[in-house]
Amino acid sequence: MAYDKFNIVTSSAVPLPIENVDTDQIIPARFLKATERKGFGDNLFRDWRYNPDNTPKKDFVLNNPIYGGKILVGGKNFGSGSSREHAAWAVYDYGFRCVVSSFFADIFRNNCLNIGVLPVQVTSEFLHKIFTAIEADPKTELEINLPDQSITILATGEKESFDINDYKKANMLNGFDDIDFLLNIKEKISEYAQDTPL
């Protein structure tokens, strides 16, 4: 399933300065029955966003209208716990194209990369600077530059580089998942198969 190409995203950000956010908090297990990637955004952080009677919790950041944007900024060790793909689906379906943290669980990171959410890992010091900038001005914008592999706090000009696998980077720039990538090179695969003796 192809997704929107990721090149440069400039956006305000939603701060979630909580460490060790696991996948069951991102999308509770009771919402994992669907097999399509649609509708999971409604239940992103469900138990943190809503009371048992389904009324919004006023003190949770996603219910605060002063915050918004395509970037979620989380605390250290974001996406730990089970390997459920639905956690990444919920982040994407809600509208986030990027998650910033000082450390990601490997499986969650890969699940994000497979569906078009860019996990940007920064140093603890830079993460602190981001949270401080957003606290000072909720409309603070970040620039996520995938070609240059950099993240910039536009208000201060402070910048840091991030790492990404070359294959995943190329896929994100083209809006490809793994199947799209194979379909894009199917002629080369056919030529190789024809030229390679069994």
Image (tube, rainbow, N blue to C red):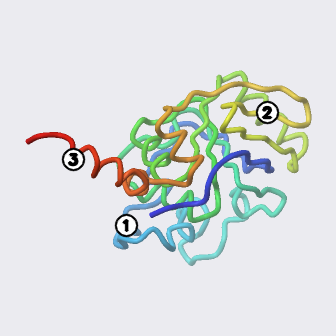
Label 1 Cα neighbours within 10 Å, binned few <14 / some 14-19 / many ≥20 = some
Question: On the picture, is 81 further left or further right than 74?
Answer: left
Q: Amino acid at mark 1?
A: Leu
| SS at badge 2 | strand
Comparing 148 with 163, the one in front is: 148
Mark before the other along the chain sequence, 1 or 2: 1
Residue depicted at 79% across the width and 28% down the height: 129
Q: Which residue lies under the disc numbered 2?
A: 152
| SS at badge 1 | loop
What quarter of the picture does the C terminus occupy? top left
Residues at circles 3 and 2 in contact by the CB criterion of under 8 Å: no
Residue depicted at 77% across the width and 36% down the height: 131
Q: Is residue 103 above or below residue 114?
A: above
Residue 62 % position (x, y): 69, 60
Q: Which mark is residue 193?
A: 3
Residue 52 % position (x, y): 53, 72
Q: Amino acid at mark 3?
A: Ala
What quarter of the picture does the N terminus occupy? bottom left
Query: Could you tell me how far apart the alpha carbons at marks 1 and 3 are, in whole angstroms?
Result: 39 Å
Query: Could you tell me how far apart the alpha carbons at marks 3 and 2 are, in whole angstroms?
Result: 45 Å
Task: From the image, state whether disc 1 or disc 2 is nearer to you.
Answer: 2
Residue depicted at 62% across the width and 54% down the height: 5
Q: Which mark is residue 32?
A: 1
Mark before the other along the chain sequence, 1 or 3: 1
